[in-house]
Image (spheres, rainbow, N blue to C red):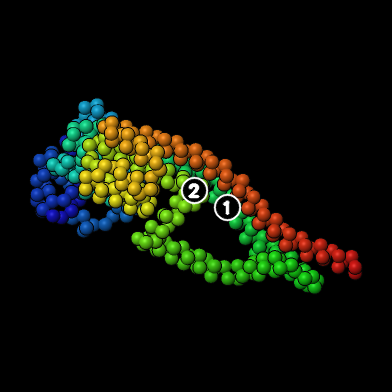
Amino acid sequence: MSLYRYKARDEMGKLVEGAVEAPTEADLIEKLRKMGYVITGVYIASDIFSVQDFFAGFGRISPEDMIFFNIQLSSMLEGGLPLLTCLRTISAQMENKRFKKLLEEITVKVETGSSLSDALTACSWAFPKLTISMVKAGEASGNLSLVLKRLADFGERELDLRQQLSGAMLYPVILLIAATVVILFIVTFIIPQFADIFLKADIPLPIVTRILYGAGIAIKNYWYLLVLGMIALFLGARIYVNTRGGRFRFDALKLRIPVVGPLIRRAAIAKFARMLATLSASGVNILESLEILEGTIGNAVLSLVVAKVREAVRGGSKLSEPLKASKEFPPDIVQMIVAGEETGSLDTMLNKVADLYESAVAYSIKRLTSLLEPLFLLVMGCVVAVIMASMLVPMFDLVKVLRRR
């Protein structure tokens, strides 16, 4: 099988482009003709390179685009439109060039007899396993529109949580950058000038002033070594974190950080409950759901717990038993899951858990923001005070010397 790109015109005369796998070029041409296309060009995808394709590769499929696609496709299917018509319509009005091209390829695959889930599987770099599994379950149950709606709801909740977290950190990050720039300017340009004056007047410098003076001179003369050192430290830390052991230790450390650790745990538990409820309600079996969760929960420590839960469930255990044994999930969550299993309403109970912990995350974010801002200002104020004191103390000594003269 080779991957071919083609250009053709449909029955309305509209230009259609795409890529599809076929045994030979003749087989592809025959398929396209059966679909009513007038072929204007066929070539092996690897044989041609275009500037447009090069720049399109730098685009990305944003969560917003994916949510909008799920909502549109769900609404159109619910309205009784055929799948192919839905895909063509959405593709025609998609503004994201890379996503538009991807949808065109998916449309061709569906036209040539593939199911939507198989077409998405062929583009697994763009569509996560969660989406593919849910679409497959929706096709099997005949409730594809409902499954897509649930998928869109899940995406909206996850995006909202991410935006809350990023929004909470925006102001402290801006303050940190501004304060760092100001402090570097003072240390590298202002303090050395004052220190030269004091040294020429034979004024002894306090130890703090000497340290800041030496640091300023070093930064000014060897800033490139500092930059290279920071880059090397960053790359080394990133390589270590990307190892299995490094990732586990780093994620374990994050969970133990005061204030921040509980927030990370609550966000992961909310994602676990919401995703498991969404997958289960869509008809995905529990083992496959746990396998998806293992790779997407976002924390190596909790991912290991999910892996152990999956193995226990495969052996005939209930979901709540290994969760309780792990001690990584709070007792209230375990008890709610136990109640859901006993009453046969696990999906409903998991959604309640997700609602509870999403509310807890929102409260924790507000609390974290209210703590970070004054704490950050206090720390920066103390740093600036030390710097100013390092200049003022020898300045007073200089004034005393001048009065004596």
At a point 21% along the width and 32% down the height, the residue shown is 143
Mark 1 sits on what residue? 176
Q: CA distance from mark 1 to mark 2?
A: 18 Å
In the picture, the quarter occupied by the N terminus is bottom left
Q: Amino acid at mark 1?
A: Leu
Residue 8: x %, y % from top left: 18, 44
Q: In screen coordinates, is 130 left or right of 188? A: left
Judge whether 152 appears above or below 101 on screen: above
Q: In screen coordinates, is 282 left or right of 324? A: left
Image marks 1 and 2: residues in contact by CB distance under 8 Å? no
Q: In screen coordinates, is 268 left or right of 53? A: right
Can see residue 104? no
Residue 204: x %, y % from top left: 77, 71
Judge whether 107 appears above or below 56 on screen: above
Q: Amino acid at mark 2?
A: Val
User: Which residue, as the protein is rendered here, is positioned at the far top?
Assistant: 79
Mark 2 sits on what residue? 260
Dot 1: few (<14), some (14–19), or many (≥20) neighbours within 10 Å? some
Can see residue 227? yes
In the picture, the quarter occupied by the C terminus is bottom right
